[in-house]
Image (cartoon, rainbow, N blue to C red):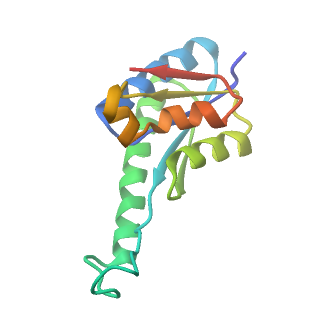
């Protein structure tokens, strides 16, 4: 039924729960996992006072977030290897994680997406938003949301 499952991860404990559930599911179903970590690049604010002054080196920042994303993926890849589950990993660079999740899922012809949600309510949900909600609104794939 689900031959290829996308799991986006940010390395958080909540994300790890979704990863664990997806590994267990894939093990039982014989599914392949595609694990994605989105590295958000440095955002340069050129119109700020003191424009042209970077609080940090943008190239170094971008390299560091890609390195962190790869570490998250390496951890998941090791867990899948221990469970005998087929796994591929992808680091994607983008300003909008939900767009990268949807794009990669479509490009890689995934059958489903497993992801975590913080389950925010009230004003937190309104102001912080939810990458999970955005994925749900922008994909036609089945999405299993874990809390």
Q: Residue at x 39, y 75 (%)?
A: 45
Using the image, determine if residue 128 lies above or below residue 4: below
Q: Residue at x 44, y 44 (%)?
A: 73
Using the image, determine if residue 99 lies above or below residue 136: below
x and y, in percent, of residue 3 in the image: 70, 24
From this viewpoint, is residue 8 visible? Answer: yes
x and y, in percent, of residue 95 in the image: 50, 58
Q: Quadrant of the C terminus?
A: top left
Q: Quadrant of residue 104?
A: top right
x and y, in percent, of residue 4 in the image: 67, 29
Count of residue discs: 0
Q: Quadrant of the N terminus?
A: top right
x and y, in percent, of residue 20 in the image: 41, 23
Give the farthest residue toward the top: 28
Q: Nearer the viewer, residue 27 or 147?
A: 147
Q: Nearer the viewer, residue 2 or 137?
A: 137
Viewed as shown, does residue 125 lie left or right of 93? left
Q: Quadrant of residue 140?
A: top right
Q: Residue at x 45, y 56 (%)?
A: 39
Viewed as shown, does residue 91 lie left or right of 124? right
From this viewpoint, is residue 75 visible? Answer: no
């Amino acid at each position: 039924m689900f031959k290829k499952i996308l799991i986006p991860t940010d390395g958080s404990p909540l994300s790890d729960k979704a990863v664990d559930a997806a590994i267990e599911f894939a093990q039982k179903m014989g599914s392949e996992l595609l694990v994605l970590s989105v590295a958000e690049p440095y955002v340069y604010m050129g119109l700020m006072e003191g424009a042209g002054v970077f609080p940090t080196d943008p190239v170094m920042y971008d390299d560091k977030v890609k390195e962190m994303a790869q570490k998250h993926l390496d951890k998941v890849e090791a867990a899948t290897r221990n469970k005998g589950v087929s796994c591929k990993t992808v680091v994607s660079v983008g300003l909008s994680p939900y767009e990268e999740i949807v794009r990669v899922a479509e490009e890689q012809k995934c059958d489903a997406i497993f992801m975590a949600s913080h389950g925010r309510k009230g004003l937190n949900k309104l102001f912080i938003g939810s990458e999970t909600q955005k994925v749900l609104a922008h994909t036609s794939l089945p999405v299993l949301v874990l809390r």
